[in-house]
Image (cartoon, rainbow, N blue to C red):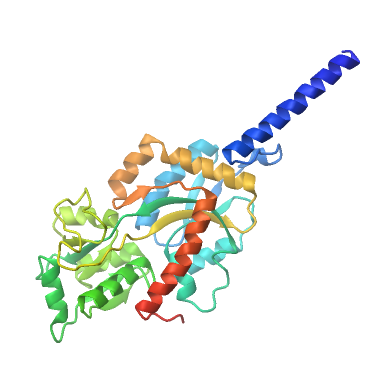
Amino acid sequence: MSLNDRADTKRRLVIKGVGAALTGMATGYPVVSGAQSSYPNKPIRIVIPFAAGGTLDVAVRPLSQQMSSILGQNVYLDNRAGANGVIAAEYVANAPADGYTLIATSASFVLNPSIYKNLKYDVLQDFTPISALMQGVGFVVIVNSAVPANSLQELIALGKKSGNNMTYSSPGIGNTIHIASELFNQKAGTDFLHVPYKGSAPSLNAILSGEAQIGIMPPGIVMQFIRTGQLKALAFTGKKRLSDLPDVPIMAEAGLNDFVFEGTWMGMLGPKGLSPAIVNRLHQAVTKSIQQPALKQSWASGVSGYVADGSTPVEFAKQLKDDVRRYSDIMKKINIQPS
């Protein structure tokens, strides 16, 4: 090859490299270097802060299967329940920032700074947002089938009777179910007693067994029991009726005006310092997974009350920041003090 040919080849390679860089800038995704393009080369752990069988677990399990196919590595779940998600979050905050330990969590993540005074991590500084997975559209007010209430107003009337000893369950202190239930207590003028459990599944089982009587829960985990008659659905907290429960009124239709609570979200984060290239790879795997018919079907049948998201890391970071402030204001309103 002549010197001129070599020079032309070099110029073409430079132009090609610049073109690739410009393409990355235009799409908003960084160009992955050769060293980082090998990611992932071993299994990826997604830590779930709640017990198996809850809404988050039900949503992320099929997502992990799709991500496994897209990334070419096993993506598996690690349920580490306890302390409203603090145990799992602390574990991931201290994990290596290599993309092999992630957390899929819910809005309890941004609630915890308003609940616990001495968290060993900062939710906005010690994690790398990847994507919001799903956004909630509302919760269902449900009661055990033995409760003598067939409407929201009848339930409120029971709650106002002297000597009322009815209880509502939640997956723990300070989660969105707890908040929605306390907001309901305030708005309705009732005094139902809160009984926290370690996760959504134990909380639901308490209502099914009659140990607790009331719940305000995501539709996905209660739908089958509403259909079998084990639970009665009295109202929906979203802005409009849920398509899966078309006969269940929203709160205003049920007689409780100005009460809208759209529930929680689900999102994925990594430890602080996760490289932009790895974040991009994971975000692309999430968005591609969400587009797969198998996952759409799984979420449609098992995660009612949510809509798929797939927001960018920047968008998800803004949601986290906004929610920390918003939920702090709500916690003060319902007089839940950090301990």
Q: Is residue 7 above or below residue 228?
A: above
Q: Which residue is at the front of the view, 231 or 309?
A: 309
Q: Position of residue 238 (x, y in %)?
A: 26, 58
How many numbered marks have been drawn onto this rendered protein structure?
Answer: 0
Residue positioned 60% across, 63% down in the render: 126
Residue positioned 90% across, 16% down in the render: 3
Quarter of the figure with residue 212: bottom left
Q: Where is residue 289 in the image (x, y as percent from the top left)?
A: 45, 40
- View extreme (top): residue: 1
In the image, taking residue 270 as reference, residue 178 lies left or right, namely left
In the image, taking residue 129 as reference, residue 275 lies left or right, namely right
**Residue 160 seen in the figure:** yes
- View extreme (right): residue: 3
Q: Which residue is at the front of the view, 185 or 194?
A: 185
Look at the image and tell me in which quarter the N terminus lies. Answer: top right
Q: Is residue 338 above or below residue 284?
A: below
Residue positioned 56% across, 55% down in the render: 270
Residue positioned 23% across, 52% down in the render: 242
Quarter of the figure with residue 8: top right
